[in-house]
Amino acid sequence: MPGRRAARLGSALTGGDRVSNADRTVLTGARLVLPTGVVDSGRLTVENGRIAEIGSTGADSSPTPQAGAAAGAAAPLDPGADAFDLSGCTVVPGFVDMHVHGGGGASYASGIAEEALVAARTHLEHGTTTTVASTVTGEIDEVCRQASVLSELVEDGLLAGVHFEGPFISINRCGAHQPDLLRDPDPALVRKLVDAARGTAKMVTLAPELDGGIESIRLLKELGVIAAIGHTDANYDKVLEGIEAGATVATHLFNAMPAIGHRAPGPIVALLEDERITVELIGDGVHLHPAVIDLAMTGAGLDRVALITDAMSAAGFGDGLYPLGPLQVRVEDGVARLVEGGSIAGSTLTLDVAFRRAVALNGLSLVRAAQVLSLNPARLLGVADRVGSIEVGKDADLVVLDDAHELVAVMRRGEWVVGSERLRAPARV
């Protein structure tokens, strides 16, 4: 059972905007984005933090309502429920970010629990209800300490897992990672990091061409941890070898790896063409041109795409100087670059912006946008039974958007996190 510290930190993550203690919350009138389609004039009932019913309040009830929700006009609301009229709004599933380093001026690599909660809360306020905390390259023992701190927050249900990005990456493609701290992926060191996370490690990014790379991918597969190929100088054949060994993710495809050559296709082509690989894409307009995102989505297919932030501590906080692990980053006009060398150093993106860009610039339907920001990463992380889509029985993790797809409110596990004051005042019925 979580202790008092966990309860206090949990309150810091989700508290402050709960509006009642009603047993049921009913949302009516909104456009509901389900994995099977869109329900206009929808009705969604939340009980005990989970989605209990989905239906329609209008004549058009397609797709078929779920779990007891009546087709056509809905039945009168039950006494004791709080009802919110969301007419004119769209409700999508809470976003799932499987690669994020920080936000709100705070970093997951700080090794400080309170700072990690600031980062998580910042992204939660922008619709990310499920977060995998990413570390950066550091001394092995220090990264192990960070993992131990983050693992407690995972165990308390505040984070969804730990992602190790570095130190097992190529010095030729290290980006915003300190070169002198990089290491070959010795399986013993890889296991040391995974063990430090005490069962909460979700993913390790490594370069397969390094000594021990293929063996470490096999080890990660045996341990049930996602092996991601990234920050790599590998050629096409070596990436294929890594995929055969068990790699299933491309870490921020296109970034920190060789470009496509017509005689040397390199890692990008190998990762795009293999159906076993889910490709991460950073949809901030800085890391990738929208046309390149279109190319990746077409090449991989939308079932294999996960939009991520790769955000550092400046996300949701503003321009200035920030630490990124042992390095210094300057953020100007929302673009993060290393002070020394000028390499792009993560993003300042939040997933509500990524959703809006995916619809406006990449032409995704609401259903497909929800898939690449929520359902696909949830499936990859093995948590799609609880999160990632609006379905009966899943956690009530919901994002309310206006008609311009700007964020209005966020609900996590049935409680309003932010924005309830911007909704029509709840009426007791």
Image (tube, rainbow, N blue to C red):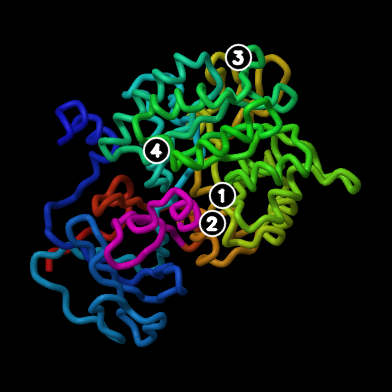
Residue 339, image quadrant: top right
Q: Residue at left 25%, top 30%?
A: 9
Left or right: residue 369 versus residue 174 is: left
Q: Nearer the viewer, mark 3 or mark 1?
A: 3
At label 1, the amino acid type is: Leu
Specify start and end residues of the magenta stretch as a single range: 375-402
> Which secondary structure lies at badge 4?
strand
The type of residue carrying mark 2 is Val
Contact, CB < 8 Å: mark 3 with mark 4? Answer: no
Looking at the rendered image, the disc whose residue lies closer to the viewer, 2 or 3, is: 3
Which residue is pictured at 60% across the width and 31% down the height?
346
Mark 4: amino acid: Gly
Residue named by callout 4: 161
**Is 74 rendered above or below residue 49?**
below
Q: Are marks 2 and 1 in contact (CB under 8 Å)?
A: yes
Image mark for residue 273: none
Identify the mark nearer the N-term, 3 or 1.
3
**104 relative to 256 in the view: left or right:** left
Mark positioned earlier in the residue sequence (2 or 3): 3
Mark identifier at residue 181: 3
At numbered mark 3, what does the secondary structure look like: helix, strand or loop?
A: helix
Residue at (39, 24) in percent of width and height: 196
Q: Between 330 and 98, which is closer to the camera in this rendering?
A: 98
Q: Quadrant of the C terminus?
A: bottom left
The answer to whether any part of residue 117 appears in the image is: no
Residue at far left of view: 79
Above or below, 370 against 205 in this view is: below
Q: Residues within 10 Å of mark 2 (few under 14, many from 20)?
A: many
Where residue 167 sits: x, y (%)? 58, 23
